[in-house]
Amino acid sequence: MFVEVIVDILNSEVDRIFDYEVSTPVVPGTRVLVPFGNRKVEGYVLNIKNETKLEKSKVKSVLSFDDEPVLIPEMLKLIDFLTQNFNLRKMDAIRLFVPAGLRKNKVQTKFETFAVLANENFDVTTLKSTAKNQKNLFDFIKEKNRENIVELNKKFTQNAVKKLVELGVLKLEKQKVIAKSKDYGAKNKDVILTETQKNIANEIVQKPDTYLLFGVTGSGKTEVYMNVIKQILSRNQTAIMLVPEISLTPQVVMHFKAKFGDKIAILHSGLSVRERYDEWFRIYNGDAKVVVGARSAIFAPIKNIGVIVVDEEHDTSYFSESNPRYSTIEVAKFRAKYNNASLVLGSATPDVESFYKAKIGEYQLLEMPERVNKAPMPNFQIVDMLSEIRNGNNSIFSNALVAQLSECLKNKKQAMIYLNRRGYQSSVVCRDCGYVVKCENCDVPLVYHKEDNMLKCHYCDARYHTLLTCPNCASTDLKYGAIGTQKVVEELKKLFPNTKIFRMDNDNTRTKDAHFEILSQFASTPSSILVGTQMIAKGHDFPLVTLVGIVDADMGLHFADFRASERCFSLITQVAGRAGRGEYEGKVVLQTYMPKNNTYRCAVNYDYKNFFKHELNIREVTKFPPFVTILRVLVSGGDEQKVTAKTKEYYDRIKEIKEQNPNSFVYLNAMKCPVKRIQNKFRYQILMRIVQKDYTKIRDLIYNIDRNLKHKDIISFVEVNPQNLS
Ligand code: ADP
Ligand code: ZN
Ligand code: ZN
C-alpha cells in the first residue's frame, strides 16, 4: 500500500507531499515518521492508494506511525476548506490542529501500568499455602478487576504480582496518563430561565442553523449558552464555546467549570505546552465534551458537535492576523455545517457585517432587548470638554466626572475609569490652558503622526505643521501624545488621596496572573477605583461598580479606518455595560470634544439599530463592506527595491485581471502602507474593493497569483476584509 504524506518542514513556502510505502494498513490522518533526504521527519498521511506513479524502487518506506490518526476525518476536510478560503498551506492547517506538545513528541506521553484480572476461574488452592500475599492479591483483584501496578506492588509485594502474572492470572496493560483539568473550586449557581431565554435556547437546540443572538449586556446571553450546551450534552452531543482571549478571565472559567465539571476542557494562552497537550488529549479521546477557549479552540478535535457558540462575535481577536490567517467564524460555520450543528453568534453590539447578514436572512436573528433583572441600562452623561476648558477647567477630568466620583465613593461603591488606547496616534494639548489643536475645516482635534512629524485631520485629510507654541496662550508646554493610565492615576490620587486606586493596562499585566490579581483585589475593595484601557471593557461582573468614566472617548473615532465608528460604538457600550450590574443603578460619564457626533448619540441611547442604519448607509454610499469585499496584498521585506519590484509584479498581474473583469473592481491601487516600516521591513500594499457577487472568483484568481509570485526573500500574502489596514 502507498500513502501520500505531507512532511512537516519549517521554512518551506510550499507544501511538500510525497508517496511512501507502508506494509501495515494505515488510515488518512495518521502521523508517520518518514525518511526525507538523509533526515527523518514527521509527516501526516493525507491519502492512501494501491498504486504510485513513481518508479517503485525510488519509493521509500514509512519508518513508523501512531496507532490512531491524530487528525479526525472532519479535519482532513477542514484542511481543504482552509487552503481554499484562506490560501493556507496544508501544513499550516495541520499545525493549527495538532498541539505543539505532540509535534516531534516534545511532550513525552506518560504511561501507567495496570494489572487486570485475566483468569477469574483460577483455583487459589493451587497456590502454596504460605503464599498469603498472592491469595490476598487474587481476592483483591477479583473484586476490583484492575488496579495500578504501583499500588499493587506496595500492598502485596512485587514478588506476588510477578508470580500471578507468570501464572496468567493477571495481565499487564499500559495506559496513557492524562492529567485532569484544574479544579477552580467554583460553585454552580442554577438560575431559572426567563420565557425569552427558554424560547431562544430551545430554538437553537431544536433547529440547526446560524443564529445571531443580539442581546444587551446583562440580558442573560451566557445563561442561554449554558442551557443550550446542557441540552446538547443530554443528547449525547458535544459543544464548543468560544470567547475572546481577554475575557477568558478566571471568573468566566470558574463559571463554566462549576457548571460542567470534568466534562469541560479549557484552552487559553496561559496553559503550558504540557497542559495544553493534556486538554487536547482529553478532547480527542472523548473525556471532555465541552471545549471552552479563545479562537484556536475552534480547531479542537471534538466529534459529534451539537452547538458552537461564539460569544462577543464582533471581537477582532476572532481574526488571526498573523500567519496562519483565518477567520474563526468562517471555520465555525464549516464545522457547524459538517456536524449539522447550530452556530450561535452572540453580541450586544454585533459586527455591522453580521447584523446585515441577519437582515438579509443569512443568519436567524434572536433578540434579548432587556436586562434579566429589568435593571435599567446605566444612564449616560455626555460632557463637552471644550466647554469645560472654556469654563476654566483644564484638568483631565470634567467637573461632572469629579462630582460623580465623589458621590460614588461616598456611597462605598466603586468606579472604573476607562481610556481608549488603540494604536499610537494622539492629539496635541496645551498643558497650560488645555487648548486642543483642531482642524480648521472640521472642528475635530488633529492627530499627531510621529513618522512624518505632521498633524493630520482624519476627516478631511488636511495636514498641518507641528506647533511650538500654543495658539491660545503662547505657552511652549505642549503635550504631544495621549494621556496615559499612569497620569490618570496620579491625578486621581491628588483628588482622592485616601482612595485605593488600581491600574490595569498592557504594561502591568504582562505576567499570567497579574490580570487576575488586580481584578480580584479590586473586587474585594469597596470605595475603590480601577483605571484601565480596553482590557477592563469586557466580561467583568463587579456588582459594586456604579460609575464608569470614559476619559477620552474621541480617541476611537480618530482612526482612519472605515470601522472606526463601529468599534467606538461597541467599546462605549461594552464599558458602559460594566456599571450597575448589581442592585445599584449605574452611571456613565462620557467626555468628548464632539458631543454631537452621531456615534455617541446612538451609544448613549443604547440604540444599536439606529447606529447600524446610519452606518450601513455610509458603507453603501462609500462602497465599503458589506457592500464590497476588501482584498489586500501585503508585500514586505528588508530590501525596499525588491519589495517595490515585487509589489509591481503583483500589481501588473492584478491589473490584467481587472481588465478582464472590469465590472468586478470598485477600486484598485498600490501604495506604501500607512505604517511604512515594521522591524526594518518595508511594507507595501495593493488594495482592492471587489463587488460582493464576484468576490470569491476574483479572490481565487488573486490567491493563484500569490502562490505563483511567492519568493523566499519577500513576505507576501493576501487578506480578505482585513481588520486592520495599517
Ligand atoms: P450577558 O452575557 O448577556 O451579559 P449574563 O448571562 O452574564 O448576561 O447575565 C447577567 C447576570 O444575570 C448574571 O449575573 C446572571 O447570572 C444573571 N441571570 C441571567 N439569567 C438569569 C435568570 N433567568 N434569572 C436570574 N438571573 C439571571
Ligand atoms: Zn495654551
Ligand atoms: Zn479636517
Image (tube, rainbow, N blue to C red):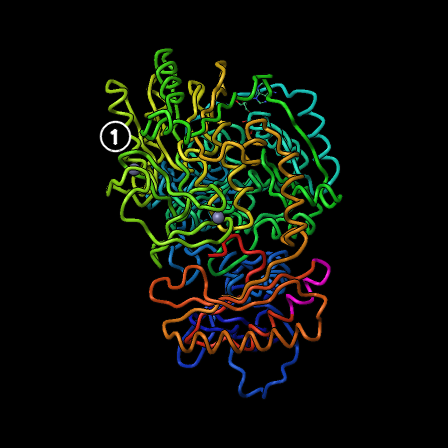
Q: Nearer the viewer, residue 489 or 601?
A: 601
Residue occupying the point 64% across, 21% down: 193
Q: How many marks?
A: 1
Q: Look at the image and say whether residue 713 sits in the magenta stretch.
A: no
Q: Magenta segment, which residues?
A: 692-700
- Front in this rendered view, residue 628 or 318: 628
* Residue type marked 1: Glu
Q: Position of residue 262 (x, y in %)?
A: 50, 35
Q: Quadrant of residue 246?
A: top left
Q: Is residue 554 left or right of residue 314?
A: left
Q: Nearer the viewer, residue 164 or 467?
A: 467
Query: Looking at the image, which residue is at 67% across and 51% down?
Result: 621
Q: Position of residue 105 (x, y in %)?
A: 40, 60
Q: Is residue 442 above or below residue 71?
A: above
Secondary structure of the residue carrying tag 1 is helix
> Percent x, y for residue 136?
40, 35
- Quarter assignment of residue 207: top right
Report which residue position mark 1 lands on: 490
- The answer to whether any part of residue 543 appears in the image is yes
